[in-house]
Amino acid sequence: MGGIPNPSTSELDELFLRRSFDVARRAITHGNHPFGAILVDENNNVLLEAENGYMPSHDGTAHAERLLATQACTTLSPAVLGKATLYSSAEPCAMCAGAIYWAGIGRLVYGLSEHRLRAVTGNHPENPTLDLPCRQVLASGQRATEVVGPMLEDEAEALHAGVWEK
């Protein structure tokens, strides 16, 4: 996998998280905000990818994680989702954390923390970042969702360079 013989969980997390960064970069080329998410099954197969979908309709709910969770729970079985990991370029907001929970995705790994994202975006009208950690949202549920992050936060923040100044 990626040239790493017998990769550790941490090495796999970094590999797949960087792939979510690639999806975020692709979102920028499509005129969207720099957010991306991928879903990986228990055997390290990428099942789905989603980029931010804000444009062209200015849909403030078209976050990458929410779009991916919707696609996942309508196309994959609960058994697969419970053992899957969603990798997100940034910490899922409360809406996206809820979508991950309701989709039944068992594990989440994210790059840029919501706190740091808020510092990067400021009070940008297209990203009025909530100050509500995804761990808090997910911990309020009736089933456990493992959360890992922030990871590779400097790389994740670099995706936003110059974007929110427009």
Image (cartoon, rainbow, N blue to C red):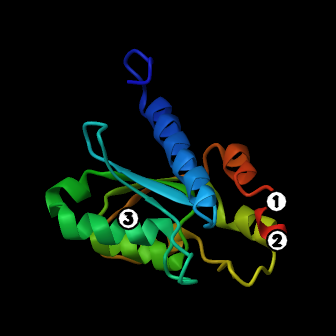
Where is residue 23 shown, x and y percent of the image?
52, 51
Q: Nearer the viewer, residue 119 or 106?
A: 119
Residue bearing the label numbered 2: 166
Q: Secondary structure at mark 2?
A: loop
The quadrant of the rendering that contains the N terminus is top left
Query: The disc labelled 3 sits on which kind of residue?
Result: Leu
Give the Cα separation between the discs numbered 1 and 3.
26 Å
Look at the numbered disc 3 and give the secondary structure of its residue: helix
Near-viewer residue (3 or 106): 3
Q: Which amino acid does the dot numbered 2 rest on?
A: Lys
Given residues 138 and 113, the one toward you in this image is: 113
Seen in the picture, residue 125 relative to 117 is either above or below; the reply is below
Which marked residue is nearer to the observer: mark 1 or mark 3? 1
| Three-letter residue code for mark 1 | Gly
Query: Which residue is at 57% across, 59% downward?
Result: 27
Mark with earlier residue (3, 2)? 3
| Quadrant showing the C terminus | bottom right
